[in-house]
Image (cartoon, rainbow, N blue to C red):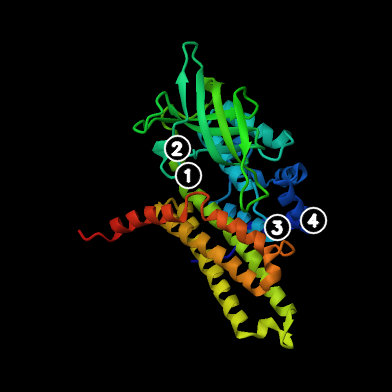
Amino acid sequence: MDFNLTDEQQLLIESAKEYAERYFDEEAQRAAYDNHHISIEQAMAYREAGFMHLGLPEEVGGVPVDKLTEILLVEKLHEYTGCILPFVTDFNTITDVIDFGTEAQQAMVMDAIENVESTCIACSAISEPAAGSDNNAMTCHTVKQPDGTYLLNGQKTWVTLGGLSIWTMVVAKDEDPSYENNSYSLWLVPNDAPGFTIGHLEKVGQQSIPFVDQFFDNVVLTEDQRLGEPGQGWKLLMKKLEFERLLVVASSLGLAQAAMNDAAAYASERVCFGKPIAHLSAIQQHLCEMENILQNVRARLYQVVSMIDNGESTRLESALLKGYACRECTKVADLAMSIYAAIGYTKEIRVGRIWNDLRGNEMGGGTTEIMEYIAGRQLVKKYKQN
């Protein structure tokens, strides 16, 4: 397949590099991880550069582009910054509002992108303490009241950006929290709503984006806060999961490439036994394995996202790639730490931080095990003899 970049894509990549160099130097990177979030200045500059508008429909003020262009932006931003960034999570929820919401909801979110100074616009709350991959185990639910409002009760967990966003898109069962109930709705809940509280969680990695529990105690919702049709919430989300998995792969690829860039350069500078360690066969073997992984993941990623651009289903391909790519990208960072040796295991060098971030991507957007379960079922169908 021909993956030569267009002139527009080349300009986008150059813009991403300029943004990263200006707003994510080494000091800014450390500050984001120490503070557990990027600055408002970094977030607003991202929006002012037009990055948040890419992929949104023209009729709402967006800039339509193909999915490959969106993937390139995510990959290159993570490579150039060397940080896990909040923009993918933010954008995913924004696109949900644009795709499923009313004109009023769309206008509200687009106005926030343009005019509200905040680190994050929106986030999604799906998982619960007893309901990760098994969505039917959710108990968060709404009950309609005689006055036409709805009361939301329950708990969500592992909510990325949940402490910073203006709105949270909550997936909740309609009326009945029982396991058998398959009726879900999506609700756009302002984070200052009465009865809505959060509890911060401490992660191993990905310290630049917060991770919280969310608690809903008789939060009052109105019909104009519902996204999409009643009872169709889960089906709506499923339509977009394939591409969202590829966005996680793109961020992993960019971070792994950053680790490769750092480690390969260090190998040419670090002298041991009278010569740069890059001349040692063991180090060269590491570099070869890392480069093979990066090239394989990149080629497969571009191929699968091109299938989506062509209107093809990628249920098998996206699950296969997400499980494989995120695991292998973590391996790239692991080998990079080996090249650095002891200093790579300190906070002086960012490859350890990148390794921690990449390990989280093996779980975000669906664990490796769940991806293999999904892909395995599809493979059985694909190769079943008639």
User: Closer to the observer: label 2 or label 4?
Assistant: 4
Crowd class of label 3 (few under 14; some 14 to 19; many from 20; radius 10 Å): many
Label number found at residue 27: 4
- Identify the residue at image location x=74%, y=42%: 44
* Amino acid bearing label 1: Lys
Residue receiving disc 1: 240
Residue receiving disc 2: 236
User: Closer to the observer: label 3 or label 1?
Assistant: 3
Q: CA distance from mark 3 to mark 1?
A: 27 Å
Badge 2 vs badge 3, beta-carbon distance below 8 Å: no
Residue that sits furthest to the bottom in the current view: 274
Mark toward the start of the polypeptide (2 vs 4): 4
Crowd class of label 1 (few under 14; some 14 to 19; many from 20; radius 10 Å): few
The picture places residue 101, in percent across and down from the top left corner, at 53, 31
The picture places residue 77, in percent across and down from the top left corner, at 66, 56
* Amino acid bearing label 4: Glu
